Image (cartoon, rainbow, N blue to C red):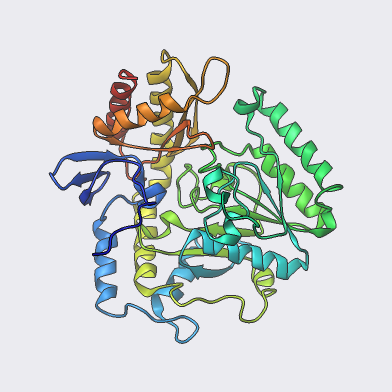
Amino acid sequence: MAQLSPVLTQATPVQVARGEGVYLYDTEDRRYLDFTAGIGVTSTGHCHPKVVAAAQEQVATLIHGQYTTVMHQPLLRLAARLGDVLPPALDSVFFLNSGSEAVEASVRLARHATGRPLILAFDGGFHGRTMGAAALTTSGAKIRSGNNPMMGGTVFAPFPYAYRYGWSEDQAIDFALSELDRQLVTTAPAVDVAAFLIEPVLGEGGYVPTPARFLEGLRERADRHGILLIADEVQTGYGRTGKFWGHQHSAITPDILITAKGLASGFPLSGIAASTALMSKARPGSQGGTYGGNAVACAAALATLDVVQEEGLVENARVNGARLLEGLRTASADVKNVGDVRGLGFMVAVEFTNPDGSPDTDTTVKAHKAAAEHGLLLLTCGPFNNVVRFIPPLITTADQVDEGVALWQKALATV
C-alpha cells in the first residue's frame, strides 16, 4: 500500500473534513478559526457559494481545453476582466498553474526582452520551490539546501528589514539602496541585469512590508539602467494587503506582475501580466503548458473576482486588517519576547526575539502549537522560524478578528 511522502509534514495536527467561510472542521467536527487561508489562497473563504456554483457549472460544461490547442470562454473572459483591476499599462496576461511557474515565466520574459542574463532578487524573498524559482529564494535554508548548484544568473541584494538591523526604517532603506548601487557597479553590473524581482511584502521571509520609498528607489534605478521591475504578488495580490495589489502602497507600477494564490479561491491558477509590447518580446514557444489556464480554475477565478468586488473585500481587508494589527499589538504588549508586530491588511506577523535580539524559535513554536490547541490555525515563517503569521480570508469580519485575537491571547498565556 502506498502512502504520502514522509517528508510532507503538517503545520497543525488537524485532519480537515470540511470548510465553511473562515472555519475548518476536523473529522470529529471540531471547529477551527482558519487564519492560514491555505497560505493566503482561500481569499473568499472556504467554499464560497458563488465560487462553488461557478466551478460546478464549468465542470459539467468543459473541464480541460488546452489553450495552445483550442481556446475557451472562461480563459478569454478572465483575461478581459483582469483589465479592470490590473494597472492600465499591464494589458497582456499569460496563465499558468502555480506561483513558481509564474515566477519562472517572468524571468524568461525579462531575459528575452532585455537580452541580459542576471536577475537581482532580495534577501529573505520567497519565489518558489522549482529549480529556477528556488534559485531566486533566500527565505530559508530548506528551499536551497541540497540543491546546489542552483540556476546561474541570480544575484541578491539586502532587503530593508529595519527590525532585524535594529535601525529606523529610513536607515534601513538608505543602507539597502546604497548597497544596491554598489552591486550595480561590482557583482551585478547594471548592463547585465535583466530585472529586479521583489515581493511587496516578504512572505516566507517574515511578513515584512517593503517600504514604499524602497520600491520607488528600485523603480527609479530600473528606469535609469534599462532594468525591468518584477513585482511578485503571489501572496500580496488580490486584496491581501488592503490594496488590490501590494505594490499600490507605493507610487510605482511594475513592468511585470505575478499573481497566484487568492486568484481562484483554491483552484490551481497563476499568471503574469505585462504590457503587450513587453509580452511580445517573449520568444515563440516560450509560453505554454498542458494545464495552464484550466477552464474550471478560470471559472472559479471569475467568480472570485465577482465576490471580491461585490462584497468589498479589499476594503474589508484594509479596515479589519488594521483591527487585527491593533488587537495583536495590544495582546502582545506585556508578553516578553514579542519583539515586533507588523503587517498590511490581512497579512500580519508577530515576531519573537530574545532580550539580546536573537530569534526566539522555541517560544514561537510553543505559541503556534498552543493557538491550534485553542482552535486558532496559524502558520510560522522567517529564516529562523520565529515569526507567527496571521492570514485570514478576506471575508473575515470584525467579530471574527476579535475571536482570533482572543484565542491568540489565550495561547500567549500558556507560553
Q: Where does the image place residue 319, in percent across and percent down from the top left?
A: 41, 35
Name the residue located 36 percent from the left edge and 27 percent from the top edge.
Answer: 366
The location of residue 322, given as percent across then percent down, is 43, 31
Q: Is residue 225 left or right of residue 160?
A: right
- Does 28 sit left or right of 24 as displayed? left
Between residues 316 and 284, which one lies in front from this camera angle?
A: 284
**In the visual, does 30 lie left or right of 11?**
left
Quadrant of residue 229 within the rendered picture: bottom right
Give the farthest residue toward the top: 334
Which corner quadrant holds the N terminus? bottom left
Above or below, comparing residue 415 to residue 307 in the picture = above
Query: Where's the C terminus, which quadrant?
Result: top left
Residue at 32 percent of width and 22 percent of height: 409
Quadrant assignment, res 372 = top left
Q: Is residue 90 visible?
A: no
Q: Position of residue 253 (x, y in %)?
A: 65, 53
Q: Position of residue 214 (x, y in %)?
A: 69, 39
- Between 318 and 13, the one nearer to me in the picture: 13
Residue plotted at (47% across, 18% down): 337
Q: Is residue 375 above or below residue 298?
A: above
